[in-house]
């Protein structure tokens, strides 16, 4: 079982968003049969089997064992991942484009950048899994509490200057065999402590590198 799987297929995304099937995916973090699941979630075994078949068809659950009980073969299923992320690739026609309106102070532009990050890293993971290779990535996830908006602005200015200098030092447009990487640095309020109110003081910083 994978820690996290990326859903890129629109049909698989639709299947995973069904409330009952999402509940089954959560329950199948540990292997279970349709009979066991039916008792847990209060549905008839036949209905559970129906939903399991849909999940299996789209690669969201897998068979791990078959047990013979009298005249019945019990299928033990398990989710293919502990968690799932739906890639914007599943909604390619309406996926946000960060290049359309770049504005580093816009929360919606940050969301578009984050969506691209999920899409690109998801595609890298899918390709790496098929090739049985690892993906070269790096991420920092930390927290910072600013005393004032002025401190936040000063931090952003210094961070921008530092990152720009660092990129300039290592970027080589003409390096033979060089491979481009995308660098994303994001600063946003921590919703765990401030709630979703965008006017609250930010307390979180994240950086991620794709490759």
Image (cartoon, rainbow, N blue to C red):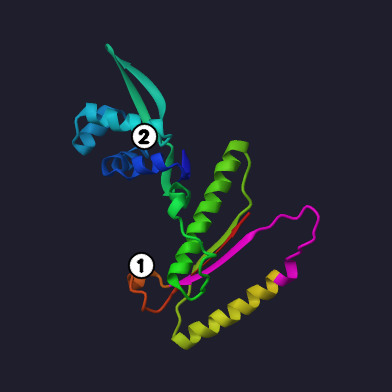
- Vertical order, 203 against 44 (above or below): below
Q: Earlier in the sequence, mark 1 or mark 2?
A: 2
From the viewer's perspective, tell me whether residue 201 is left or right of residue 207: left
From the viewer's perspective, tell me whether residue 162 is left or right of residue 82: right
Q: Position of residue 152 (x, y in %)?
A: 49, 82
Label 2 sits on residue: 55
- Vertical order, 132 against 83 (above or below): above
Q: Which mark is on residue 205?
A: none
Which residues lie in the magenta part?
A: 168-188
Question: Looking at the image, which residue is at 21% across and 33% down?
Answer: 39
Q: Which mark is on residue 192?
A: 1
Q: Secondary structure at mark 2?
A: helix
From the viewer's perspective, tell me whether residue 9 is left or right of residue 128: left
Q: Secondary structure at mark 1?
A: helix
Question: Looking at the image, which residue is at 61% across and 54% down?
Answer: 137
Q: Residue 33 sits in which quadrant? A: top left
Q: Position of residue 13 (x, y in %)?
A: 39, 44
C-beta proximity under 8 Å, tags 1 and 2: no
Q: Nearer the viewer, residue 159 or 112?
A: 112
Q: Position of residue 191 (x, y in %)?
A: 36, 68
């Amino acid at each position: 079982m994978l820690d996290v799987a990326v859903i890129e297929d629109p049909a698989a995304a639709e299947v995973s968003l069904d409330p009952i099937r999402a509940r089954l995916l959560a329950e199948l973090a540990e292997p279970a049969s349709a009979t066991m699941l039916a008792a847990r979630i209060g549905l008839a075994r036949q209905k559970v089997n129906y939903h399991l078949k849909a999940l299996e068809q789209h690669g969201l659950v897998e068979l791990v064992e078959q047990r013979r009980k009298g005249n019945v073969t019990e299928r033990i299923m398990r989710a293919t991942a502990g968690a799932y992320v739906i890639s914007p690739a599943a909604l390619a026609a309406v996926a946000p484009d960060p290049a359309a309106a770049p504005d580093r102070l816009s929360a919606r532009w940050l969301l578009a950048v984050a969506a691209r990050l999920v899409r690109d890293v998801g595609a890298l993971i899918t390709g790496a899994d098929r090739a049985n290779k690892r993906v070269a990535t790096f991420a920092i996830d930390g927290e910072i509490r600013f005393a004032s908006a002025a401190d936040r602005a000063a931090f952003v200015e210094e961070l921008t200057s530092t990152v720009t200098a660092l990129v300039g030092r290592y970027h080589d447009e003409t390096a033979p065999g060089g491979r481009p990487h995308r660098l994303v640095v994001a600063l946003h309020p921590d919703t765990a402590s401030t709630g979703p109110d965008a006017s609250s003081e930010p307390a979180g910083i994240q950086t991620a590198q794709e490759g």
